[in-house]
Image: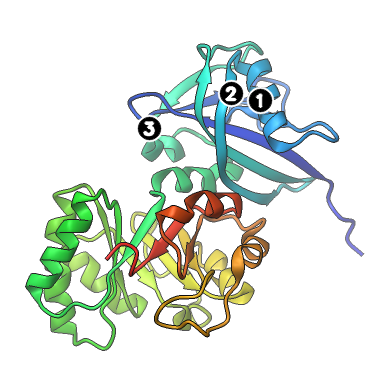
Amino acid sequence: METAKPVIHVVAGVLADRNGRVLIAQRPAGKHLAGSWEFPGGKSAPQESSLEALRRELSEELGVQTRQARPLIRYRHAYPEFAVDLDVWRVESWSGEPRSLEGQALDWVMPNQLMEHDLLPADRPVALALLLPESYLITGTIGSDDELRMRLGAALERGAKLVQLRVPNTTRPDLERLAGIAAADTSACSCSLLINGEPRAAYEVARQVHAAGIHVPSRYLSAIPSRPVPESALMGASVHNASELADAVRLRADFAVLGPVLATASHPDAPTLGWQGFERLVSGQPLPVYALGGVSEAHLHLAWKAGAQGVAGISAFW
């Protein structure tokens, strides 16, 4: 029988400067994976809450005092000898100037360059979470091309940064036309567009219109043998239970959307996860997960507390 690996609880903080760069530290000689880069932090002490540990570690390591922080992502990563329960927080405000107090090199890096910086393998989900916004718009009913332009334009003016074009029961030519319209509008606003559908067809359309990637409905996940798009493309997945979430992890999706969390106007009597059910499913999963179903930006703090990347929806954003 295989002996269970020891699990180490580690807290880490993401500090960002005014230009959007995040702070990383290089592991010094003599430590496991010395020379690799990571987010500042360390092991929590017994009886210490995550936030208490974060404040202590950032004070000891960087000389900064954490004023305000919120959960970003928490998951487990297995090394050959042990596992790390990585509890990552976004530090929203602090006092003091970060400086090296333990002899470690420091660097400020744009989030889209983190994976080129010899970041620890365990930190890949953090890098993905930093590239994703806190809300994810899914398009609703599209009665005409003009309606798409109007509704999407209004959402982009409100600051939408990630949009899923979902047009069920449509023809390929109609999807290509609508995707072209959406791609033109989103690219002008530095917004990422994903095409919903059967992975191969959706990726063909995404490539044709220069969209960022695809979003895979849950019904396709179990039959896909491996990630259906290259690493350069963004891949989201819809999931409703533990099995589908495991498929999203297996396929190395960049993120997932899980729900329904709360009752929706369209399906008021459908079973829901609730925030506790959502938290139970996403706990320990190595990818960012959006909460879906009856949620809006008013639920962001509840979503973050439950381990979500943020919130996704149709009615709240469309």
Residue 246 drawn above or below residue 110: below
Total numbered labels placed on residues in the image:
3
Question: Which residue is located at x 34 percent, y 64 percent?
Answer: 316
Mark 2 crowd level (few <14, some 14–19, many ≥20, 10 Å Cα): many
Q: Percent from the top left, x then y, of residue 253?
A: 47, 62
Which marked residue is nearer to the observer: mark 2 or mark 3? 2
Q: CA distance from mark 1 to mark 3?
A: 23 Å
Three-letter code for the amino acid on which mark 1 is drawn: Arg
Residue 212: image quadrant is bottom left
Q: Which mark is residue 66?
A: 2
Residue receiving disc 1? 55
- Residue at (64% x, 51% y) in the render: 75
Above-or-below relation of 101 to 301:
above
The residue identified by callout 3 is 110
- Residue at the extreme left: 146
Label 3: how many Cα within 10 Å (few below 14, some 14–19, many 20+): some
* 141 is higher (above) or lower (below) than 131: below
| Image quadrant occupied by the C terminus | bottom left
- Residue 159: x %, y % from top left: 26, 48
